[in-house]
Image (spheres, rainbow, N blue to C red):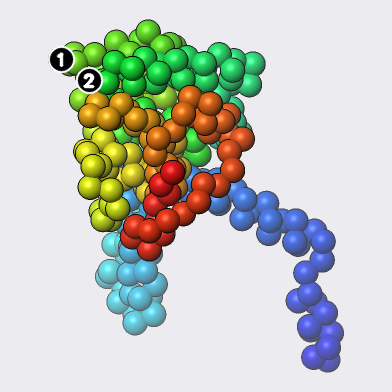
Amino acid sequence: MNPLGELLLLRPDLKDVLQIFLVAAVLYRLFLLVQQTRAMQMLLGLLVLGSIYLAADLFGLSLIRYLLAQLFQYGAIAALVVFQPELRSALARLGQSRMMRIFRRMEESQVVDEIVEAVERLSRSRIGAIIALEQEVGLDEYADKGSRMEARVSADLVATIFTPYSPLHDGAVLIQGDQIRAAGAILPLTQYSVPDRSFGTRHRAALGLSEETDAVVIVVSEETARVSVARRGQIELDVSSDRLREILEGAVPEAPQIGGSGGRRVLA
């Protein structure tokens, strides 16, 4: 066969492009499901072991290659047992759309109303609060660090959780869909410098979570009573109720960027 014929065989057709797209979409979806979970650490470990196996095969290290082959053979069964909770959670979320996991469409307006009302109450009372809404990336890792809950989102419940001196008021409330999944959760603090010296632990935790996940994080300051929203490693200050409603409904334009750590923050 001539070189031109070989090149024509390598040229992908529409079916090949479609298959590549589907495989890439599935891999991307799986990556989102395991991101920020113990399963992600397991995948990194498997990559390291796979690299060692390839090196052993390349250099003819038969003993190491044999041991790793045995580990891969029985390790898969052990992984299914150890990571059963993560797999069950991932399969439960697989196929759900982004909007379905934020708010169920039929009840979206009601959930938004409850959250906005709760934030208004907390702000009027100068009660500090931090509320994280799960999106594509799961928050189970952080929910495990708090107190698990299975409760319908309501303004009364959210306000009660953050009542001063209550057992859970210092941590974050994690919301998935129309359910409160955890309260008193401990969130990671941002590792970047912040442009506003008035930022407290809640603001730093909101930024930290928004840097590691795609969650929308609402903060109510007990010192100033102002409401802030952190997303994608940026924070918007002095958010009004109408603005908060727009953010929660997803119909929000980009806010102007100013100063702070290479433009990583949004201040309004």
Measuring 61% from the left and 55% from the top, which residue is drawn there? 24
Find residue 90 and report its horizontal and vertical position in percent.
47, 35
At a point 51% along the width and 47% down the height, the residue shown is 255
* Camera-nearest residue between 1 and 209: 209
Is 12 left, or right, of 121 in this rendering?
right
Disc 2 target residue: 169
Q: Quadrant of residue 58?
A: bottom left
**Spatial CA span between label 1 and label 2:** 7 Å
**Amino acid carrying mark 1 in the image:** Tyr
- Image quadrant occupied by the C terminus: top left
The residue nearer to you, when weighing 172 against 28, is 172
Marks 1 and 2 in Cβ contact (< 8 Å): yes
Note whether 88 is above or below 106 in the view shown: below
Secondary structure state at the residue bearing disc 2:
loop
Within-10-Å neighbours for mark 2: few <14, some 14–19, many 20+? many
For image coordinates 39% across by 21% down, the residue present is 119
In the rendered image of this protein, does residue 185 appear above or below residue 156? below
Kindly identify which residue carries mark 1.
Answer: 165
Which percent across, then down, holds residue 121? 36, 14
What label sits on residue 224 in the rendered view?
A: none
Q: State the residue lying farthest toward the bottom.
A: 2
Q: Residue 10: which quarter of the image?
A: bottom right
- Where disc 1 sits, the SS reads loop
Q: Amino acid at mark 2?
A: His
